[in-house]
């Protein structure tokens, strides 16, 4: 690693999604996938195998067109390249040949498609003619995109010796769990949004992340020294001594501000007029527990168990129980709210999800998978109940669209508890059971759901996307993803009211809870539990302590009469900036 490289500095501007600065060499993941094996399939499997491939081609088409549109909008001449990619993707002779080979030779489509594309690449590789060499790169790019979607995963345990900044087209949750996280200092991605799970994980792990760095995988090579600025959204190749000096002084100032905040992190967050807000942490990995306890978080308000599942989808009940127990013990005496598997959407488990779906976020996701795959669900519930015997563990169900799913999930949980008790286990009676409110139908029936559970947890990342019909990952509609849309706020208000009426806790664990601009509004709406990335706990506690709950309620009353999302945001932000300007410095 040569961080003192004297080559010319070059800067790319992307979108900042997780703050902080990292200075290291990059590891480019673009090319990292193993050649698919020639797996034999039966005649019965041909159609479903081809359907899987067609779905991958379709997702690739949408992806290429989206990049093309952005390039067009920016007036970039590069837009033509993507036209060529679409032609390659839809090349009739390739399509026909793949189908014919799969049908005749009964070999899985991954291998057939990959080998055929390699043949085309080999024919062009190494030719002196620069035009033809460009075609080689085009075919390679398209092939890699399709393969990535076809396999539902990009990485196979990539290895790197030094600490690195990961450069990739995108990072799915299954990609992320395969990384050696102790070596990763940041993420710089071609695509993604603030609400993608790569961004959420980066915030959880307090790593800087920048997305929308289009074509960055082609610009960099593993080993290039860069500085990644997750506050301004910059990626700087070969940072000059002057740039490094500027960042060093900025870092010293922000360290000083952060140190001041950290002094009070373990004290409770109580507003100036006595309203207590429990500030909890969100987690994805067991190794986060020490950092969470140290962050000042009162408990883990959301443990996304699907990440552990993706590490070993076939892991046994004993292994799961051991992992959950380890987390519970590490967090003691604090509670961990484990969310049962939320597979689906962007968190694809090829083993559990089956066929690729045309609209995964509206498909087989969360509790739907758990209730459909009861073997998987029962394994998880039993493991969670076993872990609950060693400390404080709550359980909540994701993506419920109404009360019936909650009842069905609870019935299975009760069954598992009875079985375990019959096996001699002493299960605590006070395990808290909750439901996530992240679908508008769930918010609108929150009163019914509240009657069945001990707490509600607002998953606003999804609640926003489903209320506004805005894909949380799609950068083209990112401007329409508005947490302060009045419809979203009404659903939050409805949920808080249902919780209050039933006398149960209501938490908010979506990313909105960590936005200091919105803390006055959320406190004003009566939310007394906020679950955020552990790196944000001290800031949110500080913000709460400076607020006055009665003033916040008046603000919320005014806001609920308003109609414009940007104006609502400005109003809450204005109170926040006046009351705790130090957090905006
Ligand atoms: C949410 O939807 O707000 C949430 C916390 O769950 P996830 O981000 O994992 O979908
Ligand atoms: Mg969600």
Image: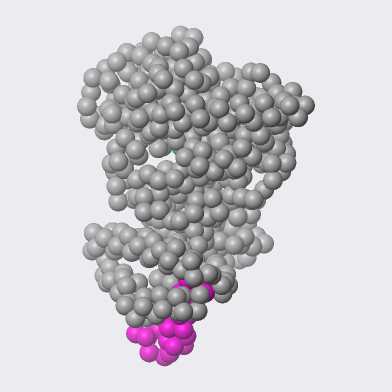
What percent of the width, then of the height, locates residue 321?
70, 37
Q: Is residue 68 above or below residue 556?
A: below
> Residue at 40% across / 71% down in the picture?
142
Q: Looking at this view, is 48 or 515 the one in front?
A: 48
Task: Specify whether residue 125 is painted magenta.
Answer: yes
Magenta span: chief secondary structure: helix
- Is residue 14 shown to the viewer in this render? no
Q: In the displayed orientation, state which residue is furthest to the bottom.
A: 128
What percent of the width, then of the height, locates residue 135?
37, 80
> Residue at 35% across / 30% down in the picture?
441
The quadrant of the rendering that contains the C terminus is top left
> Residue at 48% across / 28% down in the picture?
406
What percent of the width, then of the height, locates residue 149?
45, 61
Task: Specify whether residue 431 is painted magenta.
Answer: no
Q: Looking at this view, is 91 or 368 the one in front?
A: 368
- Is residue 112 shown to the viewer in this render? yes
Q: In the displayed orientation, state which residue is furthest to the right.
A: 424
The quadrant of the rendering that contains the N terminus is bottom right
Q: Which color mode does the image show?
A: one colour
Q: How many marks?
A: 0
Q: Is residue 10 above or below residue 385?
A: below
Query: As drawn, is 383 to the left or to the right of 117?
Result: right
Q: Looking at this view, is 4 or 279 the one in front?
A: 279
Query: As drawn, is 187 to the left or to the right of 419?
Result: left
> Residue at 71% across / 29% down in the picture?
420
What percent of the width, then of the height, locates residue 355?
45, 56
Q: Which residues are magenta?
A: 107-133
Q: In the displayed orientation, state which residue is furthest to the front.
A: 44
Residue 304 lies in quadrant: top right
């Amino acid at each position: 690693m040569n961080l003192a490289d004297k080559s010319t500095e070059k800067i790319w501007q992307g979108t900042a999604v997780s703050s902080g600065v990292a200075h290291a060499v990059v590891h480019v993941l673009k090319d990292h996938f193993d050649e698919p094996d020639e797996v034999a399939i039966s005649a019965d499997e041909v159609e479903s195998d081809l359907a899987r491939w067609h779905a991958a081609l379709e997702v690739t088409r949408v992806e290429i067109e989206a990049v093309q549109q952005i390039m067009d909008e920016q007036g970039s001449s590069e837009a033509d390249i993507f036209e060529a990619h679409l032609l390659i993707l839809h090349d009739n002779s390739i399509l026909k040949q793949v189908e014919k080979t799969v049908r005749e030779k009964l070999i899985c489509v991954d291998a057939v498609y990959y080998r055929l594309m390699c043949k085309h690449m080999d024919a062009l590789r190494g030719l002196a003619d620069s035009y033809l060499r460009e075609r080689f790169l085009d075919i390679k790019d398209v092939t890699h995109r399709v393969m990535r979607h076809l396999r539902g995963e990009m990485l196979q345990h990539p290895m790197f010796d030094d600490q690195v900044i990961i450069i990739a087209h995108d990072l799915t949750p299954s990609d992320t769990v395969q990384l050696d996280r102790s070596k990763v200092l940041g993420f710089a991605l071609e695509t993604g949004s603030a609400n993608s799970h790569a961004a959420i994980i980066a915030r959880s792990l307090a790593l800087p992340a920048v997305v929308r760095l289009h074509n960055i995988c082609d610009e960099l090579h593993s080993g290039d020294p860069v500085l990644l600025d997750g506050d301004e959204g910059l990626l700087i190749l070969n940072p000059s001594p002057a740039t490094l000096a500027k960042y060093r002084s900025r870092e010293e100032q922000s360290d000083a501000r952060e140190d001041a905040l950290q002094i009070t992190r373990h004290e409770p967050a109580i507003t100036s007029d006595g309203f207590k807000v429990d500030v909890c942490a969100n987690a994805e990995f067991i190794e986060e527990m020490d950092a969470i306890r140290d962050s000042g978080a009162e408990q883990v308000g959301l443990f996304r168990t699907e990440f552990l599942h993706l590490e070993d989808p076939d892991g046994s009940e004993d292994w799961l129980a051991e992992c959950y127990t380890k987390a519970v013990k590490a967090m003691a005496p604090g509670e961990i709210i484990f969310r049962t598997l939320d597979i689906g959407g962007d968190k694809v488990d090829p083993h559990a999800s089956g066929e690729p779906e045309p609209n995964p976020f509206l498909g087989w996701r969360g509790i739907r998978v758990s209730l459909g795959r009861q073997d998987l669900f029962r394994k998880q519930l039993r493991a969670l109940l076993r872990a609950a015997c060693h400390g404080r563990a709550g359980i909540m169900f994701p993506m419920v669209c109404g009360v019936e799913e909650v009842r069905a999930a609870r019935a299975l949980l009760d069954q598992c508890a009875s079985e375990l008790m019959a096996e001699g286990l002493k299960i605590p009676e006070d395990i808290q059971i909750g439901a996530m409110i992240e679908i508008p139908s769930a918010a609108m029936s929150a009163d019914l759901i509240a009657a069945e559970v001990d707490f509600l947890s607002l998953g606003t990342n999804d609640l926003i996307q489903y209320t506004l019909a805005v894909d949380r990952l799609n950068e083209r509609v990112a401007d329409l993803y508005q947490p302060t849309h009045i419809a979203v706020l009404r659903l939050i208000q409805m949920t808080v009211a249902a919780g209050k009426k039933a006398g149960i806790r209501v938490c908010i664990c979506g990313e909105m809870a960590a936005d200091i601009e919105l803390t006055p509004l959320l406190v004003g709406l009566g939310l007394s539990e906020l679950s955020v990335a552990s790196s944000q706990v001290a800031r949110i506690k500080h913000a709460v302590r400076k607020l006055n709950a009665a003033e916040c309620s008046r603000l919320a009353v005014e806001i609920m009469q308003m109609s414009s999302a940007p104006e609502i945001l400005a109003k809450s932000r204005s109170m926040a900036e006046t009351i705790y300007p130090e957090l905006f410095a």
